[in-house]
Image (spheres, rainbow, N blue to C red):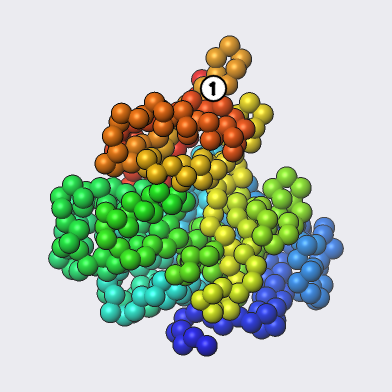
Amino acid sequence: MTTDRFLPDLPDDKLARIQLEGLRWTVGHAMNNAVYAERLKKAGVSGPEDIHSLEDLQRLPFTTVEDLRDGYPLPLLCVPEKDIVRIHASSGTTGKRKVLAYTANDTANFALQMARCYEMAGLTKEDRIQIAVGYGLWTAGAGFQAGSELFGAFTIPIGPGNLDMQLQLMKDLKSTCIGCTASMALLLAEEVERKGLRDSLSLKKIIFGSEPHSLKMRQAFTEKLGVEHTYDIAGMTEMYGPGTGLNCDECDGIHYWADLFIHEIVDPHTLKPVPDGEVGELVVTSLRKEAVPLIRYRTHDLTRIVPGQCACGRRIPRHGHIRGRSDDMIIYRGVNIYPGQLSDVLNGFADVGGEYHVELTRSEGLDYMAMKVERAGGVSSDNDKNLAQAVSMELHKRIMARISVEIVDPGTLPRAFGKSKRVTDNRLE
């Protein structure tokens, strides 16, 4: 049995009781919002008394990102505005941001879930956590910082960008852990290698958020920065922010806080549940959120439930690493392609790195896909033509799509402090 301070122990019977109680509370609380109340009543649910078991979750209607945008500026609010202590927002593609309100209890649970992540990563109060994610309207900085302070670690809140300051403080303050995007970690790793700083750093662990990263990128961080472990953090603004789960050192899925959220995996087309272990879209129902509870919220993130108990011994459910988004799917010559599939293919080639960019074009009614892939560091360019052909053949074999591949020098493709854009679709131009 573990002696964790923040991580829950969730045997099946205890978890079922917690989730049923939380589901009933959420349904009753959601009745405070007219949109939720109308939809629940149409589904035959008048209140928590109609929820008899967790199977009743399937009766409830889905909530979507459109519900949040349509209700701008304070969508799906279930508390009086005087009880709001903070808002966060994520960027919108339709001119309206998704604004999420928080009560004091919401911010406390946000800090709690982040503290759990630090504990899952094996950190202690002796660690020094450098926070290099966005502050302000974005949830990441506030969550990483509040969680670190609740956890009791030495907290260094810098925010993203400014590589020189990041490296100076990382060296002078002896940071042992950094929270950042995978793209920014790559920038830091390349700068550390360029300046020969690896041996002067105390960095041992990295917690990644905001974007998936490949095994190739993970290997680059580990080698260039000399870190012992890297971790993937899950979360989104709708679920407080980052920190809804983290992988342990066994690296066999992400432990998620099932006492705070119920996770379902559904087929993104039929919206029917898929068997455990099968990839589908993550749908989330909150169990404690006050300001903006979630009822079967479609995240569009693609993952799977990892069955069984983790070898780490903790009784905390797991889902797989996020493989991409159902709405990021590329439809190319009738083939459905997810960016994660491209990374999986590249992982099989030792002579290429983890950075790539795909461009889609259309000419005379026919679609074309071109992929630029960075060569691994220290590898000669003499074999670029054969390597490109081999990657292209494997892509065709695995994905059933013909993709033109070009091998480029390391560091050629654009770098970003935030999420890297890996696909450019020019077919509508």
Q: Which residue of the protein is positioned furthest toward the right in this rendering?
A: 44
**Quadrant assignment, res 308:** bottom right
| Pick the front one: 82 or 149 | 149
Does the rendering let one see residue 221?
yes
| Pick the front one: 315 or 170 | 315
| Left or right: residue 292 compared with residue 23 | left
Above or below, 237 against 8 in this view is above
| Pick the front one: 17 or 317 | 317
**Quadrant assignment, res 149:** bottom left
Q: Which amino acid type is shown beneath numbered disc 1?
A: Tyr
Mark 1 lies on residue: 368
Q: Residue at x 55, y 68 (%)?
A: 256
Q: Residue at x 64, y 82 (%)?
A: 11
Above or below, 131 against 193 in this view is below
Q: Position of residue 111 (x, y in %)?
A: 44, 72
Secondary structure of the residue carrying tag 1 is strand
Q: Position of residue 347 (x, y in %)?
A: 46, 46
Q: Position of residue 376 (x, y in %)?
A: 33, 41
Q: Position of residue 289 (x, y in %)?
A: 58, 69
